[in-house]
């Protein structure tokens, strides 16, 4: 693990970079404040999204969710945002762009992944559980709309005590994407 202080537009965080012994992937934890006893920690588990997080694509809600999560943790003064190397729900950046091309031709995000030969969502949250444990987190108030993420982040003594909604206002560019997440992936969204 590598650790340093990281000042951001949302205030000062401590960044921890974890390197997987299994596949060499790097994952990040941004920690705000003293986690104390590790109970009731406000947290987000965010999968990497180059297009949304870095280039601010409006096709998805990823970049906006990441920004909202960092702002909420900063406002609370205590919390964790995990940034997992799981681009495109686990299919990788090149395949995600191939899926975008299929979406441009009428497929939704699930149909595009499946046409490329993948399941709708290949993400695994085992690494997130281990990262939380290494940070001393015991119970979470998890910012997520994804019920599968809530299931995946529990175990090995880690408990989710509350789901904190993290909804982005739909736009013309992402409304179909959000509707597919709700209808086909079970995301708990009220605005679409």
Image: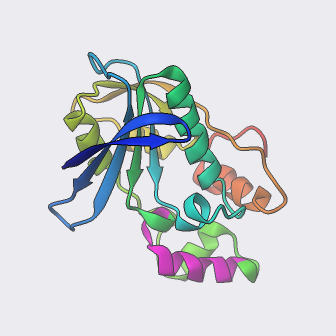
| Residue drawn at x 29%, y 21% as measured from the top left | 38
What x and y, as percent, mark residue 142? 47, 32
Quick check: 74 left or right of 179? Answer: left
Determine whether 89 is above or below 143 in the image.
below
Number of labelled discs?
Answer: 0
| Residue drawn at x 58%, y 79% as measured from the top left | 97
Determine whether 67 is above or below 11 in the image.
below
- Residue furthest to the left: 21
| Residue drawn at x 49%, y 42% as measured from the top left | 8
Quadrant hosting residue 172: bottom right
What x and y, as percent, mark residue 67? 59, 44
**Is residue 175 shown to the viewer in this render?**
yes
**Is residue 144 shown to the viewer in this render?**
no
Quick check: 78 left or right of 132? Answer: right
Quadrant hosting residue 181: bottom right
Magenta segment includes 192? no
Quick check: 106 left or right of 64? Answer: right
Q: How is the image coloured?
A: rainbow
Q: Which residues are magenta?
A: 89-103
Magenta stretch: dominant secondary structure: helix
- Residue furthest to the right: 172
Determine whether 157 is above or below 48 in the image.
above
What x and y, as percent, mark residue 47? 46, 55
| Residue drawn at x 47%, y 69% as measured from the top left | 119
What x and y, as percent, mark residue 87? 46, 66
């Amino acid at each position: 693990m590598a650790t340093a202080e990281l000042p951001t537009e949302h205030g000062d965080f401590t960044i921890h970079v974890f390197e997987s012994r299994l596949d060499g992937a790097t994952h990040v934890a941004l920690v705000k404040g003293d986690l104390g006893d590790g109970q009731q920690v406000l947290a987000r588990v965010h999968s990497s999204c180059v297009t949304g997080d870095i280039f601010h694509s409006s096709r998805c809600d990823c970049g906006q969710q990441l920004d909202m999560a960092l702002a909420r943790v900063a406002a609370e003064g205590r919390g964790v945002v995990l940034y997992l190397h799981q681009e495109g729900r686990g299919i990788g950046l090149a395949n995600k762009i191939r899926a975008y091309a299929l979406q441009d031709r009428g497929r939704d995000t699930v149909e595009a992944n499946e046409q490329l030969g993948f399941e709708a969502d290949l993400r695994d949250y085992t690494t997130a559980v281990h990262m939380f444990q290494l940070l001393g987190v015991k119970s979470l108030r998890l910012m997520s709309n994804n019920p599968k993420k809530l299931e995946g982040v529990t175990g090995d003594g880690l408990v989710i005590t509350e789901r904190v909604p993290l909804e982005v206002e739909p736009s013309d560019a992402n409304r179909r994407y959000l509707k597919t997440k709700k209808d086909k992936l079970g995301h708990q969204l009220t605005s679409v």
